[in-house]
Amino acid sequence: MRRMEKAYDEQAENALAALLNQSRFLSKIYKHKSNWANLKGLPYRGDREKAFLLMGRMLDWIMSERSLMTAQETEDAELEFDRLRAQLKLLMFQMRANEKRVQFDNALKAKIRDAEKTFNGTSKFKGDVKANVEDCLRALQNIIPTTELGISEEEKIMIVKAMELQKGHWLKCPKGHVYAIGDCRSNTMGSRCPEC
């Protein structure tokens, strides 16, 4: 009798764990769909449609009735979410680069091509494969503005060092000039754009 109770408890625990994973993955699917919807423009339409198709297949897999979700299945799903997140990040960088008319050197172009091959390939998104894509994304982040201010992190750091700012708050005037205010943390002291 105890053996049957133990088996039943184990089945119940597995079913509950599967249900929790399904719930977590559903949340991720809807978050990814929302993020991918932000990728605008005709040049990205094909990538967006492929991503939505993949998310649809993942949704079908997630929603299938199950009493167990193996560790391997959970890991594979997580890796696919990581791949989707990285692919969207690359496309968003490319979109910003086009908007800002940023040109890439040949080395970065090669990294981007390799990342795109990874996204279209079938190898698991982990280890060296993932590291190479992340290296490409870091290189892009260093040269493409990722803030609303229109400057990259690298440029922001250079400005902070040049102005010897310890703390600060970044602003953009109505004409689009970027400037920082110091220790007061607020623009209530009558600070104004040095360019204007």
Image: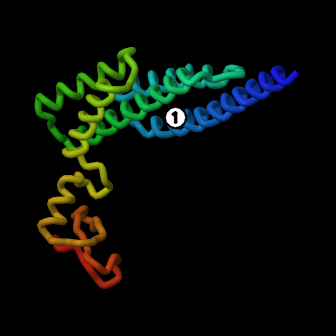
From the viewer's side, name the closer residue of 77 and 45: 77
Q: Residue at x 29, y 39 (%)?
A: 93
Quarter of the picture containing the C terminus is bottom left
The residue lying toward the viewer, choosing from 12 and 144, is: 12
Please tell me in which quadrant of the rendered image residue 24 appears.
top right
Position of 191 with respect to 38 (left or right) is left
The answer to which quarter of the image holds residue 87 is top left
Quadrant in the picture for the N terminus: top right
Of residue 123 and residue 91, the one placed in the foreground of this image is: 123
Q: Could you tell me residue 45's position as x and y percent? A: 40, 27
Residue at x 35%, y 77% (from the top left corner): 186
Residue 188 on image: x %, y % = 35, 82
To which residue does mark 1 refer? Answer: 33
Q: The disc labelled 1 sits on which kind of residue?
A: Lys
Give residue 185's position: percent from left, percent from top. Answer: 33, 76
User: Where is 141 relative to 51, above or below?
Assistant: below
- Please give the name of the residue rendered at 36% of the width and 16% of the height, measured from the top-left corner: 121
